[in-house]
Image (cartoon, rainbow, N blue to C red):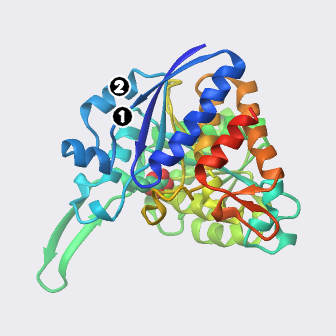
């Protein structure tokens, strides 16, 4: 197959980790006789530096006409004082919205070789853990009305609005139900329905939709504060975790850490077409950028998800996952997942070793 992939390396460690993922994708192309072409594009802080805006129109246009998009990470202290709509993160939110990527899947799994990297007691994770966070990605407080003002007595004010519609909730519920059907048949839907009106609509809509179209899927509700606790108390109870944009952002970091390192967690974002966006869930880690110590595995696994979810390449997906497993089993580790008795290597060498296993 011929596939054209847009690459948004972004900022901080973004260029290093996407280079690693591209190397692995090239190895996949060789082994399975595909032709992948890669088109580097600007988004985030690097785009602000080059053209004064985080998401140039050219980038949007090229992403929309590519077969899929690979993304590193955006942001850094250099751009932290810019107004909200000029920040690098605005570029990321903008591309998600422009591509209509309402469904964000973040599988946090405990890799056998990394059981010791979990900060939880061994017996809590001994039976294996795999939490697949299904995060709504183009609605909620990230995209609701916001503003700033002032109050004579209290001083400056600022607000952001959490707003969801039935259709938005239904389409992400459908994604979670489809996934649950292929897995345990169970969904835990996380909200804050004891306080928020938007959460009460969320809860009602999830049940109405799943009950009507997926009666074989069991949906249980959990309040977000309790979910945050349950993830560290008994992570094995979760399988598919369905939630809103903001709660998904927060809980996916927590789930990632529970399963070892945030440097291992990939994500796929899709809408109604096969052109998706694939990225690690971690940030641009400016403190370690350019030092060849970042973990490229999350981005490599994101590339694998692209092969499977955008291109329908199941064997190729499995080959990448297997290559990561083999490399870990041989004892190779980047600094974030290093433990006594394993061998520490840098970002480039990790990517090269994984590519060699393809
Ligand atoms: C993520 C990130 C982004 C988000 C930021 C960088 C805007 O934290 O993908 O989880 O909040 O969605
Ligand atoms: Mg996040």
Looking at the image, residue 277 lies above or below residue 227 = above
- Front residue (pair 206, 63): 63
Which residue is identified by label 2? Answer: 62
Looking at the image, residue 310 lies above or below residue 185 = above
Which residue is identified by label 1? Answer: 41
Task: Calculate the distance from the C-alpha at mark 2 to the C-alpha at mark 1.
Answer: 8 Å
Question: In the picture, which quadrant includes the C terminus?
Answer: top right
* Residue occupying image coordinates x 20% and y 41%: 51
Residue 250 is situated, as x and y percent measured from the top left of the image, at 53, 62
Q: Is residue 297 visible?
A: yes
Looking at the image, residue 48 lies above or below residue 262 = above
Residue 53 is situated, as x and y percent measured from the top left of the image, at 22, 45
* Residue occupying image coordinates x 58% and y 66%: 224
Residue 230 is situated, as x and y percent measured from the top left of the image, at 70, 69
- Front residue (pair 339, 155): 339
Q: Residue furthest bottom?
A: 153
* Residue occupying image coordinates x 79% and y 38%: 322
| Closer to viewer: mark 2 or mark 1 | 1
Q: Secondary structure at mark 2?
A: helix
2 or 1: tag closer to the N-terminus? 1
CB of mark 2 within 8 Å of CB of mark 1? yes
Bin the neighbour count of mark 2 within 10 Å (Cα to Cα): few under 14, some 14-19, many 20 and up. Answer: some
Tell me the tag on residue 261. none
Bin the neighbour count of mark 1 within 10 Å (Cα to Cα): few under 14, some 14-19, many 20 and up. Answer: many
Looking at the image, residue 226 lies above or below residue 91 = below
């Amino acid at each position: 197959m011929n596939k054209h992939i847009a690459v948004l390396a972004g900022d901080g460690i973004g260029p290093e980790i996407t280079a690693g993922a591209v190397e692995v994708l090239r190895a996949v192309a060789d082994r399975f006789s595909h032709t992948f072409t890669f088109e580097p594009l600007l988004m985030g802080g690097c785009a602000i530096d080059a053209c004064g805006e985080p998401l140039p129109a050219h980038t949007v246009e090229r992403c929309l006409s590519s077969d899929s998009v690979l993304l590193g990470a955006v942001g850094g202290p250099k751009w932290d004082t810019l107004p909200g709509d000029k920040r690098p993160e605005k570029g990321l939110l903008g591309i998600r919205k422009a591509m209509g990527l309402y469904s964000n899947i973040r599988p946090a799994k405990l890799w056998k070789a990394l059981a010791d990297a979990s900060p939880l007691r061994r017996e809590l994770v001994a039976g294996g853990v795999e939490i697949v966070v299904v995060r709504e990605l183009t609605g909620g407080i990230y995209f609701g009305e916001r503003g700033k003002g002032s109050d004579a007595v209290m001083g400056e004010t600022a607000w952001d609005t959490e707003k969801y519609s039935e259709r938005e909730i239904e389409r992400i519920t459908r994604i979670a139900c489809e996934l649950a059907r292929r897995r345990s048949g169970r969904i835990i839907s996380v909200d804050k329905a004891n306080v928020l009106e938007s959460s009460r609509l969320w809860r009602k809509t999830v049940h109405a939709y799943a009950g009507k179209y997926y009666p074989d899927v069991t949906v249980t509700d959990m309040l977000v504060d309790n979910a945050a606790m349950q993830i560290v108390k008994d992570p094995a109870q979760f399988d598919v975790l369905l939630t809103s944009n903001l709660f998904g952002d927060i809980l996916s970091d927590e789930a990632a850490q529970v399963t070892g390192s945030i440097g291992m967690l990939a994500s796929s974002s899709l809408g109604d077409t096969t052109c998706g966006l694939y990225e690690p869930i971690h940030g641009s880690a400016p403190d370690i950028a350019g030092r060849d110590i970042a973990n490229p595995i999350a981005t490599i696994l994101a590339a694998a998800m692209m092969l499977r979810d955008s291109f329908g390449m199941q064997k190729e997906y499995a080959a990448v996952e297997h290559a990561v497993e083999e490399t870990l089993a041989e004892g190779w580790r980047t600094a974030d997942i290093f433990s006594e008795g394993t061998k520490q290597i840098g970002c480039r060498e990790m990517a090269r070793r994984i590519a060699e296993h393809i």
